[in-house]
Amino acid sequence: MNTSETALITGASNGIGYELAKIFARHGYNLVLVARSEHQLQQLAQEVKKEYNVEAIIFSVDLSKPETVQYIYTELEKKNIAIDYLVNNAGFGDFGFFTETEWEKEQQMIQLNIIALTHLTKLFVKPMAARQKGRVLNVASTAAFQPGPLMAVYYATKAFVLFLSEAIANELKGTGVTVTALCPGPTQSGFQSAAAMEESKLVKNKKLPTAKQVAEYGYKAMMKGKHVAIHGLINKIMAFSIRLTPRRLTTSIVRKLSEKNN
């Protein structure tokens, strides 16, 4: 199947974003691939063109820079390319006590995980609503459901993504546009090493789902128009049990789970 519809995917060079790009290509959608690594994006673009006969445009840019989102939108307008599916996947975390982590890294995290995601959604959802057709997948996390000692800023950014997505999904009822918040737990990807959390009890010696498994689940949830999609039964149970647990206890439990093994 080949269509003239286009999916824009951020963080497409590896992990969940990379797998989502291949899934969209497999279903015949043209791609706009966004990430910092030009070499990896070019390889992916060549791969999907050859295997699935779809078009792929790459933007090797840094979304943590404030001007980047508008640049992407303007360039696509010049090429007369409408975005039918927006996947806000780019994001990163950081591990450590708030008093010891670096502000510069956290500022970039807020810019990428919150501001770039919000700006992209703002720019592309309006024309989707005008066309009465479109889907957005915002990659949040199971971290979105509770405070996260030792990853305080990251957990807070994902709570923002979840709440923003749910609110916009409600506003867009009846417009033909859906917004899905994908909430995976720890996943086999480059996230853990980037966040310096390989020794955390959350991930060490754990059998984690693959990025491909999470991407397949997220794609199906997006296409069904689900508002919130939590990957994995245990993650679903934990997300819902938090509602019944006193907040201070929840925060203490998350702290224990996040600490590094001695």
Image (tube, rainbow, N blue to C red):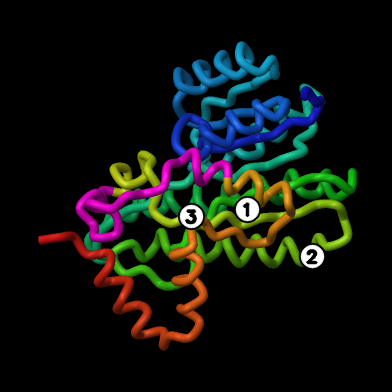
State the residue position of label 2.
Answer: 171
Q: Quadrant of residue 147?
A: bottom left
Pick whichever of labels 2 and 1 is earlier in the sequence: 1
Mark 1: which amino acid?
Thr
Q: 64 or 29, which is in the foreground?
A: 29
> Residue at left 51%, top 66%?
159
**In 3D space, how far apart are the residues under numbered discs 2 and 3 (Cα atoms)?**
24 Å
- Tell me where residue 175 appears, x and y as whole percent: 87, 56
Of the residues under marks 3 and 1, which one precedes in the sequence? 1
Kind of residue at disc 2: Glu
Q: Position of residue 168 (x, y in %)?
A: 72, 62
Q: Secondary structure at mark 2?
A: helix
Give the foreground label among 2 and 3: 3
What residue is shown at x 51% (from left), y 75% (from top)? 240
Badge 1 marks a residue whose secondary structure is: helix
- Asked if residue 157 can be seen in this view, the reply is no
Task: Work out whether 249 lies above or below 91.
Answer: below
Res 79 seen here: yes
Q: Amino acid at mark 3?
A: Pro
> Residue 211's spot in the image, x, y percent?
46, 41
Above or below residue 145? Residue 204 is: above
Q: Is residue 157 left or right of residue 259?
A: right
Q: Which residues are magenta?
A: 196-216
Q: Secondary structure at mark 3?
A: loop
Q: Which residue has dot 1 on it?
A: 118
Residue under the image location 77 percent in, 24 percent down: 1
**How much space separates mark 3 and mark 1, taking CA atoms?**
19 Å
Number of the label disc, if any, that sits on residue 184: 3
